[in-house]
Amino acid sequence: MNILLLTTGGTIASQEGGGGLIPAISSQSLLSHVADLNHKHNIHHEEILNMDSSNIQPEEWQLIAGRIYEALPSYDGIIVTHGTDTMAYTAAAVSFMLQNLNKSIVFTGSQVPIDNPLTDAKTNLYTAVAAIENGILGVTVAFNRKIINGTRAVKISTLGFNAFESVNSACMGEVFADGMRVYRTSTSCLDNDRPVQFTPALCKDVFLLKLLPGTKPEVFDMIVQLGYKGVVMEVFGAGGLHYAHRNLLDKLEMLHKKGVAVAVCSQCTYERCDLSIYDIGQRLLERKVIPCHDMTTEAAAVKLMWALTKTRDLDKLQEMFDTNFVGEVYLGTCSF
């Protein structure tokens, strides 16, 4: 198989820099640590970035997605090494920008640099290759012997090797002593009559707000003044916020009138945001907020950035959030 290894920096490529770890290992050097893979596959390498993932932002998402799109015809699968801190955002972004994929695009990294004897990097790279070998299509994250849909991955641990969890969706596959067990072969429903859909445009004017009991309503005035076009708001539980003492509902009405889209997800990691349960949820629906259902915060934020380049109409945005594009949401009608 022809496999392309794209490196972007992160812990996996880091070395001690005097003031702490910094990305410094080249793509060639990275590949040399798993040179045995070349005995089985034809692996090419390319360094497109060398950054701490805290600095990887929408511009870099577009660069990564664009290089993947260019390389797709020449390779059976592509592995992207990436820092773990923002990998879930990048994987989700690339998932929306590159749809109807009939090849494996696997993100991976490590909690310990690859040249450290205790590294998890080699296992994660071997797992990424196994995902390609087993034909798991679409954008995924390979970590700790698990394959996770790119729109379902959430980093849950800063130091543990089980750094990523597949939230509200089963893993795509897992590695056991007898090999990889594949549970699903694609992150979404493929249409073989259509080519890969590459839509790199993203609206960067999206804000993420996690509510705290007592959050001041004036925060929403600042969001408008700063020119944000959309907000992903993490609310309490199944869908609550305060309107006693400090009335956030009136400000949501103001945002709606100004055409600012407000998508709502839960601060809870698991299960869905369901605004139909409580009175406060019904009040939120009256303010035309967009429920994110069981989406991760990372997927919801990136989906809003992607959707806002297609429409500013709030009803159409609602329709898009009620559509499962790449396995990012369960609506009771699709097994992804």
Image (cartoon, grey):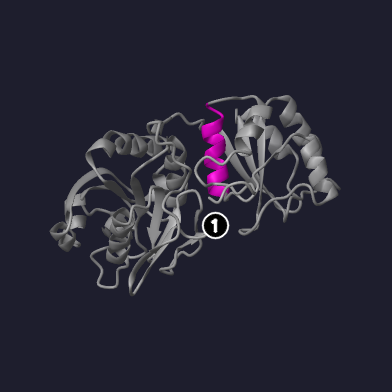
Closest to the observer: 183 or 319? 183
* Magenta stretch contains residue 214: no
Q: Is residue 247 visible?
A: no
Residue at the extreme bottom of the image, as rendered: 177
Which residue, given by chain and number where applicable, does mark 1 sit on? 169
From which residue to which does the magenta span run?
297-309
For badge 1, the amino acid type reads: Ser
> What percent of the width, then of the height, locates residue 29?
17, 55
| x and y, in percent, of residue 322 in the image | 63, 39
Disc 1 secondary structure class? loop
Q: Residue at x 38, y 34 (%)?
A: 196
Residue lying furthest front in this view? 193
Corner quadrant of residue 127: bottom left
Relative height, residue 202 to residue 299 (above, below)? above
Is residue 308 highlighted in magenta? yes
- In the displayed structure, 192 sits above or below 29; it is above
Residue 149: x %, y % from top left:
46, 52
Q: Does residue 128 lie above or below 241 as drawn?
A: below
Q: In the image shown, does 98 or 16 lie closer to the viewer? A: 98
Q: Residue at x 60, y 34 (%)?
A: 320
Give the side of residue 336 with respect to residue 28, left or right.
Answer: right
Residue under the point 27% across and 64% down: 122
